[in-house]
Image (tube, grey):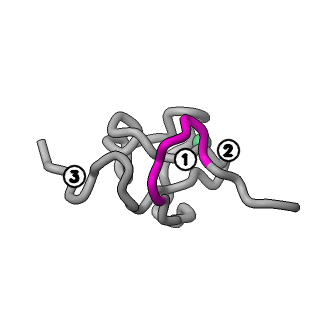
Amino acid sequence: MENIVGWKPSTNYDTVHCVQCNNAVDTPEEEATYPNGTCPDCGSPWTGTEKRSTMVCVTMPVAITGGTG
Ligand SMILES: [Zn+2]
C-alpha cells in the first residue's frame, strides 16, 4: 500500500476527471484505481490524459461544476 501524500479532507488537492464520463476521481477508492485501472463510474480504462484540477476545501458532496456552458 502506498500512502497518498497530501490526501486530506478540506484541503486543496489534485483530482482527476474521466475523459469518458467526467467522473471525478475524488475518493480514496477511485484514486486507488488510477492510473492502472478503470474508471469506477463508466469502466473505461484510464489513459493518463485525464483532466486534472485542484479542488479546494471540499465541504460539499458533489463536485463544483463551472458556470455557463
Ligand atoms: Zn468514466
Please name the amino acid that badge 2 sits on: Cys
Q: Which residue is mark 1?
A: 24
**Marks 2 and 3, Cα distance to the nearest angstrom?**
24 Å
Query: Which sits earlier in the primary sequence, circle 2 or circle 3?
Result: 3
Q: Which residue is mark 3?
A: 4
**Marks 3 and 1, Cα distance to the nearest angstrom?**
17 Å
Judge whether residue 45 is colored magenta.
no
Foreground residue among 64 and 14? 64
Judge whether residue 60 is colored magenta.
yes
| Residue 43 position within the rendered picture, expressed as x and y whole percent measured from the top left | 55, 35
Query: Which sits earlier in the primary sequence, circle 3 or circle 1?
Result: 3
Residue drawn at point x = 24 percent, y = 58 percent: 6
Q: Which residue is mark 2?
A: 21
Quarter containing the N terminus: top left
Residue drawn at point x = 56 percent, y = 54 percent: 17
Residue drawn at point x = 70 percent, y = 53 percent: 65
Please identify, in this view, whether the residue under mark 2 or under mark 3 is nearer the observer: 3
Q: Are marks 2 and 3 in contact (CB under 8 Å)?
A: no
Magenta region, residue range: 56-63
Please name the amino acid that badge 3 sits on: Ile
In the rendered image, which quarter is residue 60 located in? top right
| Residue 32 position within the rendered picture, expressed as x and y whole percent measured from the top left | 31, 42
SS category of the residue bearing label 3: loop
Look at the picture and state if 56 lies above or below 40.
below
Decide: few, some or many residues near mark 2? Use Cα within 10 Å; few <14, some 14-19, many ≥20: few
**Marks 1 and 2, Cα distance to the nearest angstrom?**
9 Å
Look at the picture and state if 33 lies above or below 17.
above
Relative horizontal placement of residue 37, taking residue 2 as reference (left or right): right
Look at the picture and state if 42 lies above or below 47.
above
Please name the amino acid that badge 1 sits on: Ala
Decide: few, some or many residues near mark 3? Use Cα within 10 Å; few <14, some 14-19, many ≥20: few
Dividing the image into four equal quarters, which quarter contains ligand 1?
top right
